[in-house]
């Protein structure tokens, strides 16, 4: 979903996170839980002004967003109070059954538009390795895919996927007083064409533009695009 937000240029990620989490998190347990059914991008320039992208993985949250972010809604970003001029509009959508139909590739290029990071306690790593990338997507699938879709059969224990090309840089950010190191750029990963795991990898990667990858995806991290021809 793309939501116009007529905010000043300097908007902290924590402020955007606070606004959107109030729309979605129904309980304190929801707010502090590790599994989130939505993602939030940093504010960026849109065609007619600043916008924020909100990805929804948990389907029932769509109605909540359309209701709570309706035109005329007043929101507070830090010390700034503003009125949303428009409601959210859909940029793209793929049903879970559509993800199940993927499976024709054995190489993928992922572009991380915002820092990709993986967390272990209060430590972070920006290394864009296939196993944590796919492990993140597998966890999201298992948390939010409907029962009718089923589990994602993605065994990464034998390291079946590897990096073939990488082009990017490391960025360091501050989040809630923590120093977070993240990777920004492109990574191409591949597996053997005859490996049956390719189908599950392709299905998992189809989820990435909606779910993001890694830690802090509700705070603007891990915004992911799928590219071709690299």
Image (spheres, grey):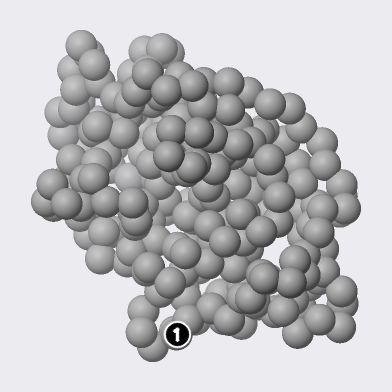
Find the residue positioned furthest to the bottom: 148
Q: Nearer the viewer, residue 141 or 123?
A: 123
Residue neighbourhood size for the residue with mark 1, other residues' Cα within 10 Å, grouped as few (<14), some (14–19), many (≥20): few
* Residue 65 falls left or right of residue 136: left
Report the residue at 48% width, 81% height from top. 151
66 up-or-down from 149: above or below: above
47 up-or-down from 163: above or below: above
Task: For residue 53, say whether it is visible.
Answer: no
84 up-or-down from 106: above or below: above
- Indicate the quadrant where residue 62 lies: bottom left
Q: Nearer the viewer, residue 77 or 155?
A: 155
Residue at image mark 1: 150
Task: For residue 182, say whether it is visible.
Answer: yes
Residue 198 spot, x, y in % from top left: 74, 76
Report the residue at 70% width, 56% height from top. 130
* Residue 6 falls left or right of residue 151: left
191 up-or-down from 209: above or below: below
Q: Nearer the viewer, residue 210 or 107?
A: 107
Helix, strand or loop at mark 1: loop
Find the residue positioned furthest to the left: 27
Report the residue at 60% width, 47% height from top. 224
Residue 75 spot, x, y in % from top left: 18, 27
* Residue 79 falls left or right of residue 111: left
């Amino acid at each position: 979903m793309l939501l116009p937000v007529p905010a000043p240029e300097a908007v902290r990620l924590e402020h955007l996170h606070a606004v959107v989490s109030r729309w979605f998190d129904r309980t304190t347990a929801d707010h502090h839980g590790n599994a989130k059914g939505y993602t939030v991008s940093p504010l960026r320039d849109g065609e007619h002004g600043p916008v924020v992208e909100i990805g929804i993985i948990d389907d029932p949250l769509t109605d909540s967003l359309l209701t709570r972010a309706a035109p005329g809604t007043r929101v507070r970003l830090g010390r700034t109070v503003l009125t949303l001029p428009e409601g959210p509009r859909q940029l793209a959508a793929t049903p879970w059954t559509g993800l199940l139909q993927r499976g024709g590739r054995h190489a993928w290029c992922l572009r991380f538009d915002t820092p990709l990071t993986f967390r272990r306690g209060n430590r972070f790593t920006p290394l864009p390795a296939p196993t944590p990338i796919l492990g993140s997507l597998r966890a999201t699938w298992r948390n939010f895919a409907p029962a009718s879709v089923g589990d994602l059969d993605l065994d990464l224990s034998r390291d079946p996927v590897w990096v073939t090309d990488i082009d990017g840089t490391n960025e360091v950010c501050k989040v809630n007083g923590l120093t977070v190191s993240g990777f920004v750029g492109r990574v191409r990963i591949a597996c053997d064409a005859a490996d049956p795991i390719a189908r599950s990898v392709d299905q998992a990667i189809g989820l990435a533009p909606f779910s993001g990858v890694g830690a802090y995806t509700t705070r603007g991290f891990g915004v992911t695009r799928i590219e071709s021809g690299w």
